[in-house]
Image (cartoon, grey):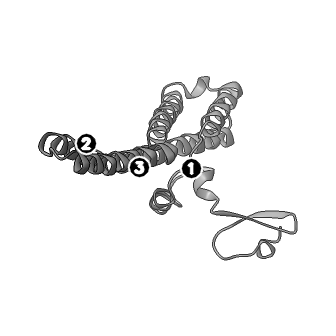
Amino acid sequence: MISQAQEVLLKQYKEKAFISAILAEEACNYYSFIKNIINIPLIVCNSVMVCVNSIITDQDTLKILNIILNASTGLIIGMISNFKIYEKINQFHQLNSKFIKLSNLIDSKMTNELENINNVFIENIIIDYTNITESQEFAFPTKIRNKIKKQYENRLSLPLSLNADIIVCENNVCCVSKGNESPNDNNV
């Protein structure tokens, strides 16, 4: 049997995993939308290229138009690659699944087997949560972080990615700043 403090800790990790899953889902949707917006000009360029190659018979004009359309296509593909849109979509989709599984595991154990929860289970939950967050390569978009923080602040335990706004370092002293405060204002 676990203490009340351990039960509160477990509940906090369940909430953090739940919020992190929402963040990941929103980020995945955000980058999927961007991918779709970027893909529209790519589709248009390729369609125009097919029409141009079928209609225009003047080789010099055809050559110039093909260069322009190929350059446009290359630019769009380069943007997708440079901003790692597909990698971000994949990462946030995977994070969403992992955080949901962790949240569900905690919820199930607390609901169905509360008397069987022990220190090892709690430690494993903390390790699993830490491993999932450490595997994250890309940050959640600020717009999404702010929206979720505003929605759940003071209602659920928030993950660190929502609690820390800005880390400010002055004179080898670092602290978390919640706006325009200086490190000295936090008595660090």
Asked if disc 3 and disc 1 are in contact, CB closer than 8 Å, the reply is no
What's under tag 1, amino acid-wise?
A: Ala
Q: Compare marks 2 and 1 and give the one earlier in the sequence.
A: 2
| Distance between the alpha carbons at the discs numbered 2 and 1 | 33 Å
Q: Where is residue 82? Give x, y as percent.
A: 51, 46
The residue at 70%/76% (across/down) is: 181
Q: Where is residue 162? Give x, y as percent.
A: 57, 56
Is 35 located above or below residue 188 in the figure?
A: above
Is the residue marked by circle 3 packed among few (<14), some (14-19), or many (20+) residues within 10 Å? few
Asked if disc 2 and disc 1 are in contact, CB closer than 8 Å, the reply is no
- In the rendered structure, the answer to whether residue 185 lies left or right of residue 5 reads right
* Secondary structure beneath label 3: helix
The residue at 48%/29% (across/down) is: 108
Asked if disc 2 and disc 3 are in contact, CB closer than 8 Å, the reply is no
Q: Which mark, by number, is residue 147? A: none
| Distance between the alpha carbons at the discs numbered 3 and 1 | 25 Å
Residue closer to the observer: 109 or 136: 136
Q: Compare marks 2 and 3 and give the one earlier in the sequence.
A: 2
Residue closer to the observer: 27 or 154: 27
| Distance between the alpha carbons at the discs numbered 2 and 3 | 13 Å
Question: Which residue in the protein does label 3 denote?
Answer: 75
Q: Which mark, by number, is residue 46? A: 2
Q: Which mark, by number, is residue 139? A: 1
Q: How many marks?
A: 3
The quarter of the image holding the N terminus is top right
